[in-house]
Amino acid sequence: MSWQTYVDEYLMCDVDGHTLTAAAIIGHDGSPWAYSSIFPEFKIEEIESMMKDFEEPGSLAPTGLYLGGIKYMVIQGENGAVIRGKKGSGGITVKKTNESVVIGIYEEPLSPGQCNIIVERLGDYLIEQGL
């Protein structure tokens, strides 16, 4: 299965008539593996900051998580595994796998919990596959 299929079928899936706003699978080095059509253009430094927070949990809390120049307030996550952020009526979930990060961006009416489930399930699956 291609990486784009994971994004199209598993991340951008329909949940109660709603979908994520944008989603991507990005390598630890910041290289994009696959992404939805409106995923924000990001800087490598933004991915590097996420990777640093996985190694040093809490490092993003003072400055916020940035993706595509958009700032998200970091909220509870799982140290070394998941970063969650909030911005207005939407937010972001980032799940670290062995080789990549799975990212989902949402806006209401999709809930933070629904975004978390979508992103973290795919991330867990990829980890089980050794990816």
Image: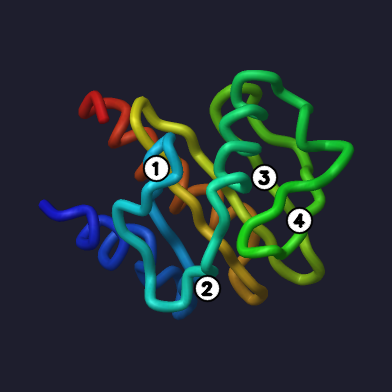
The residue to which callout 1 is attached is 121
Compute the Cα span from label 4 to label 1: 22 Å
The residue carrying pointer 3 sits among few (fewer than 14), some (14 to 19) or many (20 or more) residues within 10 Å by Cα, namely many
Residue 78 figure quarter: top right
Compute the Cα span from label 1 to label 2: 17 Å
Query: 3 left or right of 64?
Result: left
The tag earlier along the polypeptide, 2 or 3, is 2
Disc 1 element? helix
Foreground mark, 2 or 4, reads 4
Answer yes or no: do the residues labelled 4 and 1 have beta carbons within 8 Å? no
Q: Hey, which residue is sitting farthest left in the picture?
A: 1
Q: Residue at x 60, y 26 (%)?
A: 54
Tell me the number on the disc at residue 84: 3
Is residue 26 in sight in this rendering?
yes
Query: 77 left or right of 4?
Result: right
Q: Hey, which residue is sitting farthest right in the picture?
A: 62
The residue carrying pointer 2 sits among few (fewer than 14), some (14 to 19) or many (20 or more) residues within 10 Å by Cα, namely many
The tag earlier along the polypeptide, 4 or 1, is 4
Residue type of the residue flagged with mark 4: Tyr
Query: 61 left or right of 55?
Result: right
Image x and y of residue 15, in percent: 44, 69
Compute the Cα span from label 3 to label 1: 15 Å
The residue to which callout 4 is attached is 72
